[in-house]
Image (tube, rainbow, N blue to C red):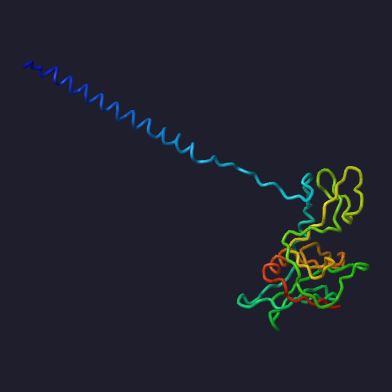
Amino acid sequence: MKCISAPNRTMRLVERFLAGFLLVLSLLVVAPALHAQDASSTTPPKVSHPKQPYSSKGVVLRQYTLQDRVRYQLWNYTWKPDPDKPITRIEVRIGEQKVVVYQGDDVAGVSPTTTGKPGHDTPTGHYTILLKDIDHKSNLYGVFIDSNGYVVDGNAEASEKPPAGAAYDAADMPYYLRIREDGVGLHAGFLPGYPASHGCIRLPHAFAELLFSNVSVGTPVDVVP
């Protein structure tokens, strides 16, 4: 039998140890890469879709001046409904330019309003909410805007031809509550402090949002002189 000297035996053990260590090290390095490659082949890549600003034209985005934003927002109103009771009736008082919201006999909210101007008077009568549309656009009235999106004519009609270099933008009627088949309804809009609409009942934006969120199709609406 051939004998192996102690030094040679030690060298063989060291070589085997190093070989095993290098094998384990290579597996530790290669395995995560293979796992990542396998995961990437089965998981579809995430695609980021940036949000596009809303425009009824899809070409020019309407711009609002600071004055526009202030007068659209800063109106005093009250809103104190019982959260456990439904809104039972809305009353539009044309003479007072006021909207009163009821829960039974209790007043749940009061807001200023702008109703129809002479020639476009808001019709009185007893109605109900026929339709709710949170992002409604008028199909009759709007504005002409220039190539930068600023209003050049704030009293345009859909049937009119825009001036040279201008485009038509339908009027925004957010939080729209239709009460008549001819399109008359309540919605957020500009309140100048006197009757000025084409027949609709304009409300401050914040109040219109609250009202929209708390009424249903079928809620009664009384429009009184």
Q: Residue furthest bottom?
A: 105
Work out whether 192 lies above or below 79.
above
Work out whether 203 lies above or below 42.
below
117 with respect to 53 (left or right): right
Q: What residue is at 82 percent from the left and 76 percent from the top?
A: 223
Q: What residue is at 79 percent from the left and 48 percent from the top?
A: 57
Where residue 77 sits: x, y (%)? 73, 71
Q: Quadrant of the N terminus?
A: top left
For the residue pair 98 and 167, the one nearer the viewer reads as: 167
For the residue pair 209 and 23, the one nearer the viewer reads as: 23
Work out whether 223 lies above or below 137.
below
Tell me how many marks there are.
Answer: 0
Q: Quadrant of the C terminus?
A: bottom right
Residue 85, located in which quarter of the rendered image? bottom right
Where residue 47 sits: x, y (%)? 59, 41
Where residue 197 sits: x, y (%)? 86, 65
Q: What residue is at 67 percent from the left and 71 percent from the top?
A: 214
Q: Residue furthest left?
A: 1
Work out whether 199 lies above or below 68.
below
Where residue 117 sits: x, y (%)? 90, 67
Residue 177, located in which quarter of the rendered image? bottom right
Q: Residue furthest right?
A: 119
For the residue pair 72 and 37, the one nearer the viewer reads as: 37
Q: What residue is at 93 percent from the left and 67 percent from the top?
A: 119
